[in-house]
Image (cartoon, helix red, strand yellow):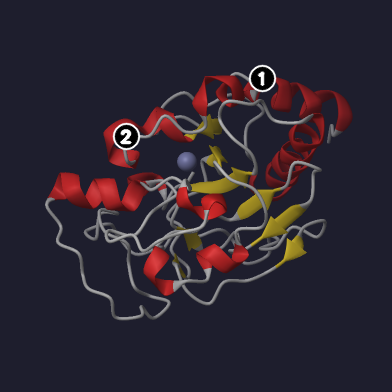
């Protein structure tokens, strides 16, 4: 799950539960809702740490910004161009809903996004370039790419989703040198889950125990099916 705007409007079921670190972090930091002005692309979500240095260590230009196997659906809002400070790996989220998140993440008021989305049948959509910062997990945004997975925390990832997240991960290993291991803290490297960031990442349980426990299965799939 990623973010929710501070003042939610009525949402459909498929989008209402998308997780929401920016709003909670904003609350924790005492940041006031910045109003309803449709944000330009550079609008920064609350609580991301504005004192961070500029993205001098952004991914090298020669590396692929868009995964060739993914359906490219670039957002025009809700991300920070060139905003990656480093590349620690990939963070797994659960949508708590179904169907593409492109329309949801294209709403300027939502103030959230993710780099990738994977359907239950394994389709991959990419919304944000790997050279840019998606708004998915609070203070972790400058350091990690993010993948939303369709479905609910009460149900595990489908076999097709495991395979597709593994393909994303193998791509990240090839392009950015991600380590073939599980990350367990925001200072780690590898494949992590949203909830490992605790309060600084919005205090979410996302993606829940079932899907969190599948990180090993994803890495195993990378190892056996998509070795370099
Ligand atoms: Zn999440």
Task: Farthest residue to the left: give it.
Answer: 30
Task: Farthest residue to the right: give it.
Answer: 225
Numbered-mark total: 2
Residue 110 in the image: above or below residue 108: above
Residue 66 in the image: above or below residue 95: below
From the image, tell me which residue sits under label 1. 216
- Residue 30 vs residue 227, the one in the foreground: 30
Residue 177 in the image: above or below residue 212: below
> Which mark is first along the chain, 2 or 1?
2
In the figure, is residue 12 to the left or right of 22? Answer: right
The CB of the residue at mark 1 lies under 8 Å from ligand 1: no
Q: Is residue 138 visible?
A: yes
Residue 177 in the image: above or below residue 72: above
Q: Is residue 187 visible?
A: no
* Residue drawn at point x = 29 percent, y = 80 percent: 37
* Quadrant in which residue 173 is drawn: top right
- Residue 53 vs residue 5, the one in the foreground: 5
From the image, tell me which residue sits under label 2. 203
Q: Quadrant of the C terminus?
A: top right
Real-space Cα separation, disc 1 to disc 2, in angstroms = 23 Å
* Residue drawn at point x = 67 percent, y = 60 percent: 126
In the figure, is residue 49 to the left or right of 226? Answer: left
The CB of the residue at mark 2 lies under 8 Å from ligand 1: no
* Residue drawn at point x = 56 percent, y = 58 percent: 59
Nearer to us: label 1 or label 2: 2
Which type of secondary structure does the marked residue at label 1 adopt?
helix
* Residue drawn at point x = 65 percent, y = 22 percent: 214
């Amino acid at each position: 799950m990623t973010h929710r705007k501070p003042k939610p409007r009525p949402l459909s079921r498929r989008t209402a539960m998308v997780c929401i670190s920016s709003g909670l972090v904003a609350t924790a930091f005492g940041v006031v809702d910045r109003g309803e002005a449709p944000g330009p692309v550079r609008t920064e979500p609350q609580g991301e740490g504005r004192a961070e240095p500029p993205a001098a260590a952004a991914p090298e230009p020669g590396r692929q910004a868009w995964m060739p196997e993914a359906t490219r659906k670039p957002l025009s809002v809700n991300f920070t161009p060139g905003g990656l400070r480093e590349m620690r790996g990939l963070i797994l989220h659960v949508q708590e809903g179904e169907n593409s998140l492109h329309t949801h993440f294209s709403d300027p008021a939502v103030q959230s996004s993710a780099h990738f989305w994977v359907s239950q049948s394994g389709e991959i959509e990419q919304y944000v370039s790997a050279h840019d910062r998606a708004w998915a997990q609070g203070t972790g945004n400058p350091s990690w790419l993010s993948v939303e997975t369709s479905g609910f925390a009460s149900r595990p990832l489908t076999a097709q989703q495991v395979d597709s997240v593994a393909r994303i991960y193998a791509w990240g290993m090839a392009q950015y040198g991600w380590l073939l291991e599980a990350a367990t803290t925001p200072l780690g490297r590898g494949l992590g889950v949203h909830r490992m960031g605790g309060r600084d990442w919005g205090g979410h349980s996302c993606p829940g125990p079932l899907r969190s426990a599948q990180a090993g299965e994803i890495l195993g799939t990378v190892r056996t099916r998509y070795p370099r």
